[in-house]
Structure formats: structure tokens, C-alpha cells
Image (spheres, rainbow, N blue to C red):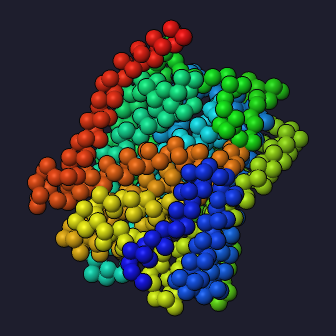
Amino acid sequence: MGEGLLAFLALLPIIVVAIFLVGLKWPASKAMPLSYIVAVLLALFVWDVTFPQVAAATVHGLIVAVTLLFIIFGAILLLNTLQESGALHTIRRGFTDISPDRRIQVIIIAWLFGSFIEGSAGFGTPAAVAVPLMVGLGFPAMAAVVAGMIIQSTPVSFGAVGTPMLVGVATGIEPLSQLDISSFVFSTATKVATLHVIAGLLVPLFLVGIMTRFFGKNKSFSEGLKVWKFALFAALAMTIPYILVAYLLGPEFPALLGGLIGLAIVIPAAQKGFLTPKGEDIWDFEEKEHWDPIWTGRLELKNNDIYAGKISMWRAWAPYVLIAVFLLITRLTPVGDWLKSAKIVVPNIFGTSITSSWEILYSPGFIFIVVAVLTYFMHGMKPSDFGKAVKTSWKTIIAASTALVFTVPMVQVFINTAGGAAGYPEMPIALAEGVANLAGSVYPVFATFVGGIGAFVAGSNTISNMMFSYFQYGVGERIGADPSWIVALQAVGGAAGNMICVHNVVAASAVVGLVGKEGHVIRKTLLPFFYYSLLAGCVGYSIIWTAEKGIFNIGTIIALIIWTIAVYIIATNNRRLDALSGGRKSA
């Protein structure tokens, strides 16, 4: 079979997702079974993989789905516990004291707090923490999920204390025995950080612009851009420490320390009114009765009048502080190794090489549940109120399970298609080889998109890097480019792919009960994903080929066009705001 046709067939499960989930806006619970069926048929009848292999991949996917549902349940339980204790009332008041403007709040919570949590735990944990927190503060569920997805970009390559680099890239390039792997990973991490800082500078602007465009009364991107000075300030407050840490300390701490230092800089500045809107310029959502029904999920959060106002600020925030502390302890100390030893293992499923395991005590879900129980005592709750939180959380998780039990098995079948009688490489590699051969020397521009496709399918920057790092290194050698830069582009694209990853969108939506609306979310995150991958790819192309093709190569030109457009949009924003204001007055 020709390489192009094979690549197209490997793309079919993704095409199904694009058509039915994103294009036709089917719920994931209906679209993902179709994608799963397509992947299974291709595995069995084109790749000629054995039935036990496909069945084993499916079972492994179901086990992974259960581990995700465990995390989601823990996150929902903590949120509902805080709601029942009255802590959410106090937290909401605290953020209003920093700034009542929702644009400022989303930058602090999603971009800075989310980056810190990503650096601590990774693997979708920011969505499980920051997304429900935003809903608790009064954000529409869909706005919170979209924000949670958009920030799954800059910090992700260094999430979970550097796992996508230390495990993903390092494991992916293991066959290259001639390399000093640790030195290669450290060197590549600095390149990854450089690319992320360049592309990540505009992420907070995308956050606020998309929020006001899709969830504001006036449906105006310009209303978000009005806080561009604060957005760029917050971007730099995170990314400058981020890149310094990457160069000085390596891949473990850029996202963690970048987010933490950013919070330490931005929150006091915002409290003093630095670059924040005031008076009539403060932006908020409309009253809830005016919201589009698709914005809201099944998670209904209301203040508990019995406890409202009785929980002090430090007690209200104590559960989130505990989460951060526990995540750091379990990821950076021998305690984590002890917790990992308590795991459920299903080896060699159906006689295949596929083994599934669940480190239940190491899971963020276990930490969420422990903190929820501690909150019950710290906040002096009644047993009936905690019982209500448990019951409500269980109902939410049941509704979320349908989509995940098809999404994750589809991913595992897609990945585990090597070794079939047809002799073809596994589907992800077949797809990537088709792209590489089509692109030729322009490939660096597309390297990020290959990484993004890997994350889109696998739901993980780490897995994408495992799948493609060796391949990307080989492409670099084949086209005469520095392979470490191509691998860096892979890692950056794999991070950006988290913005549109079905796996993550389903999980984040489930946390706030936004079931069946996943396609709406992905449609809103496609633009930031495309921007991020294209800009990083073009900058990488420019760096790789400047010595040979001169500074004004195609990569440099496209990158300059992107930045020129961004500067023009910001510079002319007041004019559009005046036109919008005039239109409202005449109406």
C-alpha cells in the first residue's frame, strides 16, 4: 500500500472526530463510539492486528478511563465540599477584592494558578482544579472549560515536574544509543522553553479575547483585548522566570516556579490596581438567566446560606494549599515512590505485551478525596452536608462516564497497532511519515502539528513525545536540520495539542457537568491551537535554516506577519471599542 494512502487511512479516526464532534457538534458520547469502531476496523482489517491485541488495547483503555474518572470524581467532590461548607462564598469574595473584573480573574486563575498546578501534577490536573474553581466563582461552565484548555499549552511541556521531557522525550529517543540522553533532554528543554515563551506571550490575550467574544453580552473580542497591558504583564511575570529556570535548573521546574512566581508578582499588583480596569470599565458576564443554555453544565453551585461568611479566607483557601503541598511532596520526595508501590496491575492482557496498571494512591484523585475529607473537619461541616456533596459528585461522574469509556479505548487501539501481519508501522507513525514526506525541507513548520496530532489522539504531551521523538529526530537528520530543534518542535506541538485534545476536553467538561458539548469547546480552542503551533513552527524553521537560507526565510516572514497582525489588532482596539460603544448608544 502506498505511503500516502496509508497515512490517510491512519487519519480516518481523527477525521471522524473532526466531522461529527467538531463539525456537526455531536456529543462525545455519540461521536467517539464511531471513532472507536473505525479505529478497530482499521486495526483488524488494514493493519491486520490480531483480535486479542485489539481487545487488550480496549481493556487497557477502559482501565485508563476508570483512572480518569477517579480524578474527576475527586475534583468534583472537593468543589462540592467547598460549596456545602460555604468556602466558595469566601473565595469568590476574595477574588472580587483582587478585582471584580472577570478578565483579570481568568488570567490569575487559569494562566497563573493553572500553570503552577500543571507544573506540580500535569496530566489534566489544572482542569480538575482551576475549571471548577472558576465555575464556583460564577463563570459559565463552558467559559471555564475553554479557559482551562487554552492554558494547556505553555506550561505543559514541563508539567508534572518535567515528565513530558524527562520521560516522554527521554523514552522516545532511547533507541539512539550514541546519545547522552540526559544531556540531550536538558539541551532540548532550553529550546522548548524558548519556543514556548515566544508563542506563550499572547496566550493570556487569547484567554480574555475568546471569553468576551463567545461569552460576553456584546460578543466582542475587543472587550477582552482592552486589558492587553495586564495580559502581557501577567504573561511576562510567568514566562521570564519560566525560561530562566529552564536554562538554569533544567526541565523539572519551569512551569511550577514560573506559575508560582507569577502569582507572587501579579496578585499584589492587581490588588493595588496596577493595570486593572476600574469603574465602568469593569467587565462581567450577563445575569445567568441571559446565558445561552449550552454554556451551563449539570454542576449547579449555590452558596450555602448556613455557612456563608463564616469561613475565613485562610480556611477557605487551605484545601487548595493542601493540594499544592501534597502534590509537591508526592512528586518530589520518596513519599511518591512509596505511594506508587500501591498499585493495581493487569499484566499481559489476553496474552499480549499490553500491561495496564493503576497507581491509585499516587493519583491526584486520591489527593483530592483526602483533602475533601480533611475539609469536612477543618470547616466543621455537618455529616449531612458532606453526604450531599458525595451524592451530587457521584451523579455527575456517572453522566461523564459514557464519553470516556469510548474515547480512551479508541486512543489505545490507535496507538497499539504495531506488529500487525500487514507489516505497517503503528497508525501514529504512518500518519507522521506521510506528513514528513509531503513537507520536505519545510517540515519544521509542520513538526509542531505532528506533535499536536499525537496529543490530540493520545491525550498527553508525554505520550506524544514517546511516540514521535525518535521519528522527529530521524526527520531532522534526513533533511539536514539540527535534530534537537525538531524534537523541541515536537514537544511544543505536543503541548499545544492539549488545547484541542478530545480526551482532555471530555475530562474537563465532565468535572463541571458539561456533558455532550465537547465539540463546542474544541471549536473555540482551534484558533489558539493553530496560532500556537504555526508560530512555534515558523520560529523553529527560522532558527534552523537562518544560517543556510538567511534571516528572511519563509519561517521568519510568517512569524513577522503573525506578530504584525497581533500588534495591529491591539493598536486599533480602541477604535473598535469606540465603534462598539457608539453602536450601543444608537441602538
Residue appearing at x 45%, y 21% in the figure: 276
Q: Is residue 574 above or below residue 394?
A: above
Considering every residue shown, the one lying at the far top of the view is: 586
Residue 158 appears at what percent x and percent y? 42, 56
Query: In the image, is residue 296 above or below residue 280?
Result: below
Q: Position of residue 460 (x, y in %)?
A: 51, 61
> On the rendered structure, is 29 left or right of 522?
right
Q: Residue furthest right?
A: 384
Instruction: Name the residue nearer the viewer: 153 or 214.
Output: 214
Q: How many marks?
A: 0
543 sits to left or right of 411? left
**Residue 129 on image: x %, y %:** 61, 45
Q: Position of residue 359 (x, y in %)?
A: 64, 68
At 25% across and 41% down in the image, what residue appears? 561
Q: Residue at x 65, y 52 (%)?
A: 26
Q: Is residue 69 above or below residue 381?
A: below
In the visual, does 3 lie left or right of 123?
Answer: left
Is residue 55 left or right of 564 when viewed as pictured?
right
Q: Is residue 408 visible?
A: no
Which one is in front, 442 or 472? 442
The quadrant of the picture occupied by the N terminus is: bottom left
